[in-house]
Image (cartoon, coloured by chain):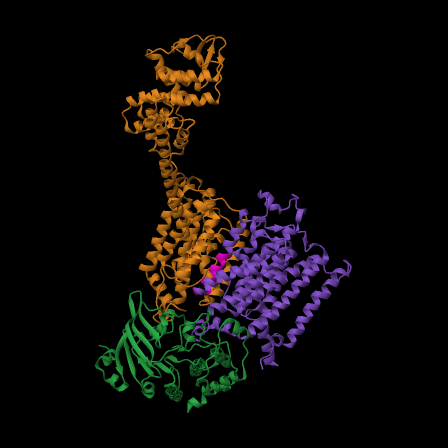
């Protein structure tokens, strides 16, 4: 800032002043009363004079002083006359000028307005953007002038908006009406507040302007609501992707193999802790590449969850094939053991997993609609995993074997499919995908020993709604439940949304007991 | 001679049945005035595009014993599912007697109005004793409240004992049914069917797993039941079918291919084609 | 010919069982009170308040376990939502206990403290009548029954079975827990009900009241056992086990499984409600965590440990697991979940018939070798 000031000052010194500033106005900047100061600032702003920029800039940087009856700018060891910009002798006892918050706000608005006349396009653009939130009625003529001079369409659009805001206070109803009409096309809660006073009879006498203002607010509201709903759909989409990642593993273990695995949520937890572990490793040994811990965590999460899955399958689940209720209880036991193990190993508290820097921030689609990168990446990641699973199940030998074992275990065994090994592999695959879900989850929610418990009910709901034996069912059900619950949350609150979703599922099952994508036929029973 | 051994099948005064499980009335009594026990007309059932039954039309006369044969996948079991309410047809009519629309009733209601079914695979209550199996099947008020307070009367005990003798399981009366041999389980299921006193019996491969002697006795029993009851028997064992006599219907790809006595059907060119492959 | 209902109830248990039941009642109605009140605290025979509360609590759990066994062991329907019915009974009676506090709460108001906290001015409509003991008693039975009926009717009508049913019941109790966690629901939110002072005007903390509650729980457990024994021996019980083993066969011989399942489901829920109502004054607190899915699934393990399909099994299971729990949580708190988890695994893998089955196997082997 100081650098910029220097350049401006130098420029001011070398060039002869185009139109001298009014010395009285400059003097008034040092007035006792804040209101007088504001008036002076506004007056100086109206001139749109480069010298005014110099003076106001100095004031904003606390280098404007009062020496006797003259305003002076003191920069280090040099002193200048504020009005003319001529170098003068350092005054004896310069008095500092109080710049309170109100003045500071006024100054930054004024400076922004003045920069509208800068030669540099980028400076003008920045200034026009900055202005949007602090337009005062006095700026109207200034903005009109800037508008007349401006040729860049982007800046012109911004200026039109600012001018309209400034014109809202105009004495002429026709000007106000035109301003309101111009503002009706915007989408910003701030403009809405600006328009609000014009809907009141006490502050706005003209009927037509008032009606137009009401209509404008309605139009803005409509667009705001649209943005809000789009935002909800998007967060529903990302919740759906999380559910999908959680449910894809289940779709294999339960949907395809018929094993009910209550420890599935804990496999998510394993994946999340693997991500945490990888982050710690990078912090300790590769701090320069910390941003890359996340891709490195993906295989670790997959294989550690898959390994635990294999151990579970070999030691417990194998002995319970065909006894689903017993499997349910035994795997619940496994989940308790896993939760307690996580507590013993990592402590009962949540651990901190940070987003890599390339995942922070987001894309701003509308003034109030921001799509965060981490959620966009999770949606993409879910798509990637989905494609992977689809290819594995439909295009590879393993997938063919799994489907064969599912449909007719005895016959598959007879034709030489190693059924026991296929069971282990398929279960490991389901568990590994849960681990991948854990990686995604670690980026948007807490990582702790109990994190899996919250997802088990949801992911089973996805499988129940989607129907058994179908990947497509799981996909649609996950996205549907995700979006539906976020939309519902918007107007009913999280708890009520959750409860109504559960009620809806119970009702839904009345109509389609086998889920959306049910297999039909006489072989379905038992 | 068997019918004298089997008082369970004698006509008994109708009790308070007529009410179904939910407490409301099933439309009317069984009306056999036109001599037809079961009408199936243009029944179509499809599973994901595959037509298990394709415009099947079949009438079973009152007191008739009808055999149904056909290759695997001809729709025999699906037909029984439609009659007993397990599967709803996509289109077509299914009437029991003149007035009872089977497509509107649930499985228990259909059982209650007098259609009994024996499954292909013997399904009995393996944890219950043989006589408890018969007691559960016995024709009586089967609503919850009545079951809570039910107590076997002497008369009912006699009926169970008679049926036990008929199916030659009186030695096994107090053993868990799960311990019976396959043939004995088939007999027990037939015994349960008799205890229900149905007017129409649907029997899906009743003699699979039976010895020749048992098969012949079963044929004898079925023949003796015909007349008072209507029977529909699905069977692959041609010797058994021959023993039963009566009309034979051949199903193929969900509809009737041929109908007539066994000799006629066996000489039908189309039937031979279907069975021997084309 | 047809023996009277009384006779049939008597026939529900054999002589040995009646004797055991008599001994149990004598112990809990005479011996325990004597050892608590008449024996000095320094005596070796003295039973502490802690002991009485613990055993009273476990008897409530045993009641829930019997109810669970009726639906799971005999009906073949595994409910993972029985904690909900237990909690509903508890909340229904808890409302009465909250009203009995009167103006002795921390705010000295006419309404329970949490309502003052929510800035409510008066009792909401669904609390009206809760100051009457009889109304509370009715709610204890009616609320679980109604919830179970409505849910069960729709679930059984659409023939939801097996694991599907289990998962849906789990979702049900989970949803209810979320609902009760909300302050606006009007049942004390997170904290639930606690700080009870009186029941029917008697102090809840006095030894006499505790012993009466203990005795009532023992009586309720004994009555439940006799009722359950009669139920499973009746034809109803046989139809129920038949549905468990071959539901389609039951339909094709003319029983409608819907009403049989629904009856046992509602009976089971009501028994849980009663257990919950007895539990709350003894333990002194009820909060939404009673409805957590983990609590409900624990009930299943009590039944599995004891032996399902028997009536004594669930009671043994409830005592074994809960005594182990109170020992672990005092001595090795960090190992309790490991133990419980392994219990789930070991019982399902190695003891499908539970402890009762194990005992039967051992005695049968001894009988064979002797």
Kindly indicate the quadrant of the structure image that contains residue C211: bottom right
Q: Chain C is drawn in which colour?
A: purple
Q: Nearer the viewer, residue C32 or C268?
A: C268
Query: What residue lies at 68% left-to-right and 68% top-to-bottom?
Result: C25
Question: Where is the C terminus of chain A found, in terms of image quarters?
Answer: bottom left
The main secondary structure of the magenta stretch is: helix
Residue B174 in sight from this viewpoint: yes
Q: Chain A is drawn in which colour?
A: orange
Kindly indicate the quadrant of the structure image that contains residue B181: bottom left
Q: Which chain did the renderer colour green?
A: B
Q: In this view, does A462 lie to the left or right of C357?
A: left
Task: Identify whether A303 is placed above or below B260.
Answer: above
Relative image position of residue A461 (x, y in whole percent): 43, 56
Query: What residue lies at 40% left-to-right and 34% top-to-bottom?
Result: A189
* Residue C182 is a magenta residue: no
Question: Where is the N terminus of chain A found, in terms of image quarters?
Answer: top left
Q: Is residue B96 left or right of residue C9?
A: left
Residue C332 in sight from this viewpoint: no
Relative image position of residue B256 (x, y in whole percent): 27, 77
Kindly indicate the quadrant of the structure image that contains residue B166: bottom left
Relative image position of residue B278 (x, y in whole percent): 22, 77
User: Total marks drawn?
Assistant: 0
Q: Is residue B49 left or right of residue C56?
A: left
Q: Nearer the viewer, residue C118 or C29?
A: C118
Furthest residue in direction bottom, as rendered: B1
Q: Which of A353 and C130 is in front in this view?
A: C130
Residue range highlighted in magenta: C158-172
* Residue C164 is a magenta residue: yes
Task: Identify whether B26 is placed above or below A5.
Answer: below
């Amino acid at each position: 800032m100081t650098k910029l000031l220097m350049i401006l000052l130098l420029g001011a010194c070398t060039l002869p002043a185009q139109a001298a500033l009014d010395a009285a106005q400059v003097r008034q900047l040092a007035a006792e009363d804040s209101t007088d100061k504001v008036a002076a600032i506004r007056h100086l702003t109206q001139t749109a004079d480069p010298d005014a920029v110099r003076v106001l800039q100095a004031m904003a940087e606390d280098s404007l002083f009062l020496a006797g009856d003259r305003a002076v700018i003191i920069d280090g060891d040099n002193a200048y006359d504020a009005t003319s910009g001529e170098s003068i002798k350092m005054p004896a006892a310069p008095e500092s000028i109080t710049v309170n918050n109100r003045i500071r706000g006024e100054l930054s608005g004024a400076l922004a307005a003045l920069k509208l006349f800068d030669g540099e396009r980028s400076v003008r653009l920045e200034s026009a953007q900055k202005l949007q939130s602090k337009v005062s009625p006095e700026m109207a003529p200034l903005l009109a002038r800037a508008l007349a001079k401006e040729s860049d369409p982007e800046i012109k659009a911004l200026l039109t908006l600012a001018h309209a805001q400034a014109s809202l206070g105009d004495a002429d109803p026709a000007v106000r009406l035109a301003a309101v009409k111009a503002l009706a096309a915007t989408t910003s809660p701030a403009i809405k507040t600006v328009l609000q006073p014009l809907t009141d009879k006490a502050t706005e006498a003209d009927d037509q302007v008032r009606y137009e203002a009401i209509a404008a607010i309605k139009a803005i509201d409509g667009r705001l609501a649209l943005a809000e709903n789009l935002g909800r759909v998007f967060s529903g989409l990302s919740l759906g992707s999380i559910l999908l990642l959680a449910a894809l593993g289940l779709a294999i273990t339960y949907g395809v193999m018929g094993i009910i695995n209550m420890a599935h949520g804990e496999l998510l937890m394993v994946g999340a802790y693997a991500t945490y572990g990888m982050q710690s490793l990078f912090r300790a040994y590769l701090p320069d590449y910390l941003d890359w811990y996340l891709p490195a965590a993906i295989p670790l999460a997959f294989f550690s969850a898959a390994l635990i899955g294999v151990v579970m399958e070999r030691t417990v689940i194998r002995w319970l094939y065909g006894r689903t209720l017993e499997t349910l209880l035994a795997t619940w036991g496994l989940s308790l053991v896993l939760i307690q193990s996580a507590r013993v190993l990592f402590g009962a508290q949540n651990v901190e997993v940070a987003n890599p820097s390339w995942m922070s921030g987001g894309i701003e689609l509308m003034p109030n609609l921001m799509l965060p990168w981490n959620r966009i990446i999770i949606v993409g990641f879910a798509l990637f995993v989905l494609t992977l699973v689809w290819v594995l199940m439909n295009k590879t030998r393993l997938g063919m074997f799994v489907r064969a074992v599912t449909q007719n275990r005895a016959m598959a065994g007879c034709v030489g499919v190693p059924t026991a090994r296929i069971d282990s592999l398929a279960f490991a695959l389901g568990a590994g995908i849960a681990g991948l879900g854990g990686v995604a989850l670690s980026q948007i929610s807490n990582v702790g020993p109990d994190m899996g418990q919250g997802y088990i009910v949801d992911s089973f709901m996805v499988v129940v709604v989607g129907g058994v034996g179908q990947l497509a069912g799981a996909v649609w059900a996950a996205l549907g439940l995700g979006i539906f619950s976020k939309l519902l949350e918007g107007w009913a609150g999280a708890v009520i949304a959750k409860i109504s979703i559960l009620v809806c599922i119970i009702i839904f099952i009345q109509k389609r007991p086998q889920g959306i994508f049910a297999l039909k036929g006489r072989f379905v029973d038992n | 001679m068997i019918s004298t051994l089997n008082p369970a099948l004698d006509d008994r005064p109708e009790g308070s049945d007529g009410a179904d499980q939910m407490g409301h009335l099933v439309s009317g009594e069984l009306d056999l005035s036109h001599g037809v026990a079961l009408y199936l007309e243009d029944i179509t059932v499809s599973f994901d595009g595959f037509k298990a039954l394709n415009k099947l039309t079949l009438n079973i006369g009152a007191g008739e014993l009808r055999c149904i044969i056909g290759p695997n996948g001809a729709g025999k079991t699906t037909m029984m599912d439609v009659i007993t309410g397990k599967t709803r047809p996509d289109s077509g009519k299914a009437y029991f007697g003149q007035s009872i629309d089977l497509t509107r009733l649930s499985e228990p209601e259909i059982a209650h109005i007098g259609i009994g079914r024996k499954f292909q695979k013997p399904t009995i209550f393996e944890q219950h004793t043989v006589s408890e199996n018969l007691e559960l099947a016995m024709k009586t008020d089967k609503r919850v409240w009545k079951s809570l307070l039910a107590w076997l009367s002497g008369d009912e005990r006699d009926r169970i004992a008679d049926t036990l003798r008929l199916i030659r399981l009186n030695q096994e009366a107090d053993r868990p049914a799960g311990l019976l041999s396959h043939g004995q389980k088939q007999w027990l299921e037939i015994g349960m069917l008799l205890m229900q006193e149905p007017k129409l019996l649907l029997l899906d491969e009743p003699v699979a797993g039976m010895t020749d002697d048992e098969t012949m006795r079963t044929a004898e029993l079925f023949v003796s039941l015909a007349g008072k009851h209507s029977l529909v028997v699905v069977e692959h064992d041609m010797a058994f079918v021959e023993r039963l006599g009566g009309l034979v219907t051949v199903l193929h790809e969900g509809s009737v291919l041929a109908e007539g006595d066994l000799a006629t059907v066996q000489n039908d060119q189309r039937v031979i084609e279907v069975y021997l492959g084309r | 010919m047809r023996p009277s209902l009384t006779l049939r109830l008597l026939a529900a248990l054999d002589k040995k069982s009646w004797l055991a039941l008599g001994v149990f009642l004598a112990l809990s109605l005479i011996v325990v009170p004597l050892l608590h009140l008449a024996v000095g605290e320094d005596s070796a025979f003295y039973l502490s308040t802690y002991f009485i509360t613990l055993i009273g609590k476990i008897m409530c759990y045993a009641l829930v376990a019997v109810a669970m066994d009726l639906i799971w062991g005999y009906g073949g329907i595994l409910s993972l939502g029985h904690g909900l019915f237990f909690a509903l009974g508890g909340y229904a009676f808890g409302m009465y206990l909250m009203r009995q506090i009167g103006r002795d709460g921390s705010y000295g108001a006419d309404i329970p403290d949490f309502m003052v906290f929510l800035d409510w001015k008066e009792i909401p409509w669904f609390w009206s009548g809760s100051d009457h003991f009889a109304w509370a008693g009715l709610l204890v039975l009616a609320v679980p029954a109604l919830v179970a009926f409505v849910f069960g009717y729709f679930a059984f009508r659409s023939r939801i079975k097996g694991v599907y049913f289990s998962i849906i019941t789990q979702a049900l109790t989970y949803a209810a827990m979320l609902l009760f966690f909300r302050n606006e629901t009007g049942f004390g939110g997170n904290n639930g009900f606690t700080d009870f002072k009186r029941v029917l005007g008697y102090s809840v903390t006095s030894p006499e009241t505790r012993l009466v509650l203990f005795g009532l729980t023992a009586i309720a457990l004994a009555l439940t056992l006799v009722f359950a024994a009669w139920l499973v021996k009746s034809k109803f019980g046989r139809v129920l086990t038949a549905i468990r083993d071959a539901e389609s066969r039951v339909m094709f011989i003319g029983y409608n499984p819907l009403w049989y399942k629904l009856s046992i489901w509602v009976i089971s829920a009501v028994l849980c409600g009663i257990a919950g109502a007895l539990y709350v004054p003894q333990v002194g607190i009820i909060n939404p965590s009673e409805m957590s899915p983990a609590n409900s699934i624990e009930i299943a393990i009590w039944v599995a440990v004891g032996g399902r399909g028997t009536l004594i099994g669930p009671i043994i299971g409830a005592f074994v697991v809960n005594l182990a729990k109170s020992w672990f949580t005092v001595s090795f708190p960090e190992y309790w979940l490991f133990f419980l988890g392994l219990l789930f695994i070991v019982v399902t893998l190695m003891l499908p018939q539970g402890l009762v089955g194990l005992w039967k196997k051992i005695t049968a082997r001894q009988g064979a070798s002797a």
